[in-house]
Amino acid sequence: MGKWNYWTERSYYHAELRDRAKGIKSEMEAAKQISQLIFNKAKSYNSILDAGCGTGHFILSLEKKLKDDFKYLGVDITEQHIIDATEIFKENKNFEFQLGDVRDLDVEDKSYEVSICSNTIPHIPQIGKAINELIRVTKNDVFIRMLVGDEVLITKKALSDKFDENGEPDSFMYINIYDKNYLNNIIGDKGELFIYDDEFDQDAIIKHYNEHKDIAGKNIATRIVEGNQFKGYLMLPWKIVHIKLY
């Protein structure tokens, strides 16, 4: 099977997230929206788990919106992100970081009031494992930014011109879309599903695309076409999924 966690080897991506965590670059649109939704919708937010945390850059948006101190654990599969995050936020003892996989979290059951997983689920296999892990470790509210549409599409975007004997790319990125029924089947009777439209500053996305199209590649950097987000030829129906746990 080809390699799907392409971002671990993208040095420009590591640098981008470091600058966001340091406040050198502007907040991510997703971070602003999820922080607002936590403030508006979560039962409480004294403790937050961020799965696929990168360098912990969501912390800056959470601090702005939530105001109060909160306990935070960031988990990421990329070792460099955890190294960077630990260094950047070393002065705040409420913030911890852990190398790990959202599909198999080394976290006790129901140990965080809120969990976040942003921009990760569309790019990994076995999302049922990931979502059930988030449910397992969370007391009240799970917020996931992912691609949700009217059908399930499992898509591999080839990042290499090398293919194996089965026609599978040597290196690729998943860009997977799931529908509401698929999500409800995963959640079952563990909670209630809410889906919110993705809100973003179109100019901010265009600016980011223009800054990154030459570094990341035009088919990897996200662009805007007639108000919709695209990655190459693929339209990205981003949504915020909120699972309110019973």
Image (spheres, rainbow, N blue to C red):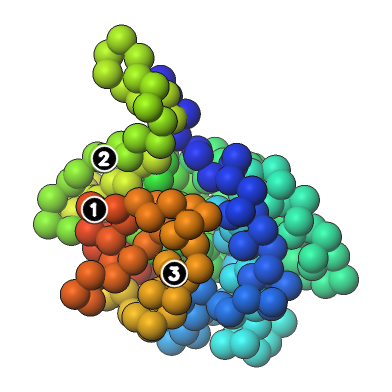
The amino acid beneath tag 2 is: Thr
Residue at the far left in the pictured view: 150
User: Residue 155 bears which disc, if any?
Assistant: 2
Residue topped by disc 3: 210
Q: Residues within 10 Å of mark 2 (few under 14, many from 20)?
A: some
Q: Residue at x 23, y 70 (%)?
A: 225
Front residue of this view, candidates 155 and 222: 222
Asked if disc 3 and disc 1 are in contact, CB closer than 8 Å, the reply is no
For the residue labelled by badge 1, is the local secondary structure a helix, a strand or a loop?
strand
Instruction: Specify whether residue 230 is in view.
Output: yes
* Residue hosting label 1: 234
The quadrant of the image that shows the N terminus is top left
Q: Are marks 1 and 2 in contact (CB under 8 Å)?
A: yes
Q: What is the C-alpha distance between the residues marked 1 and 2?
A: 9 Å
Residue at left offset 62%, top offset 87%: 64
Image spot of residue 139 (x, y percent): 51, 63
Q: Residue 107's x, y, as percent?
A: 63, 48
Task: Determine if residue 33 is in view.
Answer: no
Image vertical order of residue 151 relative to residue 100, above or below: below
Type of the residue with mark 3: Asn
